[in-house]
Image: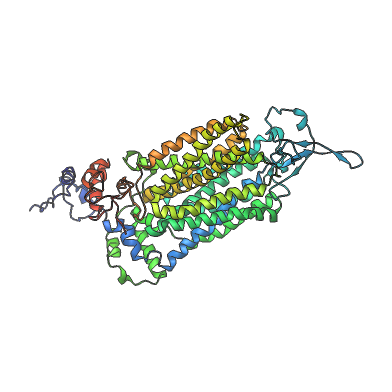
Amino acid sequence: MAIDRRREAGGGGRPPPPPEENGSVPAGAAAPPGPPGAAGAAGEIQALPPPAAACSPLLLDYDGSVLPFLGGLGGGYQRTLVLLTWIPALFIGFSKFSDSFLLDQPDFWCREADGQGNWSGYLAPGPGNRSGNDSLFPPPVLPTPAGGNASECECHEWHYRIRAGLVQNVVSKWDLVCDSAWKVHIAKFSLLVGLIFGHLITGCIADWVGRRPVLLFSVIFILIFGLTVALSVNVTMFSTLRFFEGFCLAGIVLSLYALRIELCPPGHRFMITMVASFIEMAGQFLMPGLAALCRDWQVLQAVIICPFLLMLLYWVIFPESLRWLMATQQFEASKELILQLTHKNRMNTESDIKGVVPELEKELTRRPKKVCIVKVVGTRNLWKNIVVLCVNSLTGYGIHHCFAKSMMGHEAKMTITPNFYADYYTMAGIALASCLAMCPVVGFLGRRGGLLLFMILTALASLLQLGLLNLIGKYSQLPDSGMSDSIKDKFSTAFSIVGMFSSHAVGSLSVFFCAEVTPTVIRGGGLGLVLASAGFGRLTAPIMELHNQKGYFLHHVIFACCTLICIICILLLPESKNQNLPENIPDGEHYTRQPLLPHKKGEQPLLLTNSELKDYSGLHDSAAAVSDGISENTTANGMKSM
C-alpha cells in the first residue's frame, strides 16, 4: 500500500487525464511541444517531469539474461579476457614477496684492516646467527636504538653475508644495522601501508569511473614509481617510493580481481579465482631463482617492475566491465560493448531469445546511476556481511604471523644450520597446500561452510598452542613426568603448521566471499575494505619485529579471541555458491542467511518472506524497483539461480 501511495503521488499510479478543450495542460501531464519561449509565457502551467520508471528487470539480470546471450565463457573473446587477468598475477607475486629479498637482514661483522692488508674483526649479532651445538655465532639480538652493548656497533666498515641469493641488498647498501636497524622495519611498513591506502581509495574510484581506468593508470604509475625505487639514493627515498609503489600495486590487484569475478558465470567464479592465486604463488616460488640471477637489489627491483610494461597493451585490448556498465545503467556504452563482443565471438543476433538488445534500445536515454560504498550505511544486511568479512580477513592474516613466528622460534632452537631457502619454501609450501585444500572443501561445503571449517581449525590450533603447550611446559619441569622440551617443540611445530594452513585459507576465502556478496555497483569499495583489513593483519608482523617481539603472547591471545568471535559471526553470512552476483544494493539486501543444513520437507526455507524482506530492507526510495526486479522463482538467498 505504501508503494501504491507513492506512485499515485508521483503520477505513476494512473494515466493522466485528457487535455481540456481550451488547450491547457493539467499539472501532472506532459506538455505538448511548442515554440521556443512559450513555456515561460504568462498564464501557462509548466509541465512537471515524469517520474523515473524502474529499469527493465531483464537488463539487471546479467547472469540470467545478458551473459548467456554473450555465450558465457564459451565465447572465445571472454576466455581471452580471463587469460589476460591471469598473466599479471605472476608479476604481482614477484612484487608482493620482494621484501623477503630486498630487506633481508644478513649476517654482518666489522672488518678493520691494518697496513699490510690483514684484517681482524668480530661477529656482530645477526638474524641468522643462532645458538646450538653446531652454531658458529651467538644467538640473535635485535639491536635497539639504545644500542645495548655500544662497542659492538662502533665500526667504520661492515661486511655482510646475505642469505637471500643477492650480493647486495638494501640493508648492506646503506648499513641498516645496529642503531639503524629500525629503518628496515619502516621500509617494510611503507609497502604495506601503501597497499592499505591503495585498496581503500582505488576501490572507491573503480566504482565511480570504472575498473579499466583504475587498472591502466595504476600500471602507468607503478612503472614510474617502481623503476624510480631502483634509483633511490638513501633509505628515506626508498621507503617513500615503496609506499607509492604499493598504492599502485593495490589498484592493479583490486581491479583485476573485480574484472575476473565479473567476467565469470556463477559456476566458474571460484576456480578461475583460484587459478589466479596459483599463478601468483608461482611468482613466490620463482623469486629465489630470480634473485640469484640478478645478484643486485637494484637489478632485481627493475626486473620485477619491467614486466608491467606488457600491461600497457591492455589499453587497446581490455574493455570496461560490461557487468559494471549495465549495473550503473550506462546503457549506451553497454550497447557498443555488446555489439563488439558479439562481433568478436562471431555470434548471430538471432540468439538473443530474451530480447536483451531491444530492451537496451529502450533504455539508452537513461542517466547513469553510480553508487559509493558509503551507501551501505543505510542498509540492514549488506553492511553486516562486509563487516563480518573484514574482521575475518583481519584475523586470518593477523594470526598467520603468530603461527609463523612460533614455528620460526622452534627452528631457532634446532642444532642444524639455519637456511633462508628452507624457511622461505616452507612458508610458500604451506600456502600452496592451503589453496589446494580450499578447492574441494569449498566445492563440497560452499563458501560459508568452508570459511567456518577453516576458522574452527585456526581457533583450535591457536587455543591448543596457547593452553596445551603451557601445560606441557609445566610438566616438563618435573623430573619424573617423562616430558621434555623436545615434545613441546614438536607440538608447537604441528600446531603452527595447522594454524598457518587454515589461517591462510580464511584470509583468501574472506576476500573472495566479499567479492560475491557485494553488489556490482559497490564491489570495488567492498573489496577495498576487505583487502585493506587483510593489509592491517599483515602489518602486525613488522610492528612486532620493530618492538623486538615484546607483547607477542598478548598479540596471539587477542587474535585467538577474535577467531572465536568470527566463528559466531560467520553463521550470519549468506551462501553465495552457484548464486547470481547481486547487481545493485537492493539485490545485495536480498542475500539473506539460511541454515547450514539442508531443509526438511515442509519447512520454510527463508527466515522472512519476500514481502517482509521489502519492509526490512530499509531502502524506501527503491522499494518499487525491488518489487519489479525480483523474479517469481527465487532461491533461499532471494537471488535467481542459473
Residue drawn at 52 percent across, 56 percent down: 278
* Residue 171 at least partly seen: yes
Front-most of residues 593 and 194: 593
Front-most of residues 15 and 536: 536
Residue drawn at 47 percent across, 50 percent down: 254
Extreme-front residue of the structure: 480
Extreme-left residue of the structure: 21
Where, by quadrant of the figure, is residue 189 drawn?
A: top right
Quadrant of the snapshot with the C terminus:
bottom left
- For residue 423, side relative to residue 315 (left or right): right
Q: How far across and down, in percent of the image, does residue 302 sit?
A: 64, 53
Quadrant of the snapshot with the N terminus:
top left
Q: How far across and down, in percent of the image, does residue 174 sit?
A: 72, 40
Number of residue marks: 0
Front-most of residues 340 and 474: 474
Q: How far across and down, in percent of the image, does residue 87 sit?
A: 53, 59
Extreme-right residue of the structure: 116
Where, by quadrant of the figure, is residue 264 drawn?
A: bottom left
**Structure colour scheme:** rainbow
Q: How far across and down, in percent of the image, does residue 631 sit?
A: 24, 55
- For residue 389, side relative to residue 43 (left or right): right
* Residue 213 at least partly seen: no
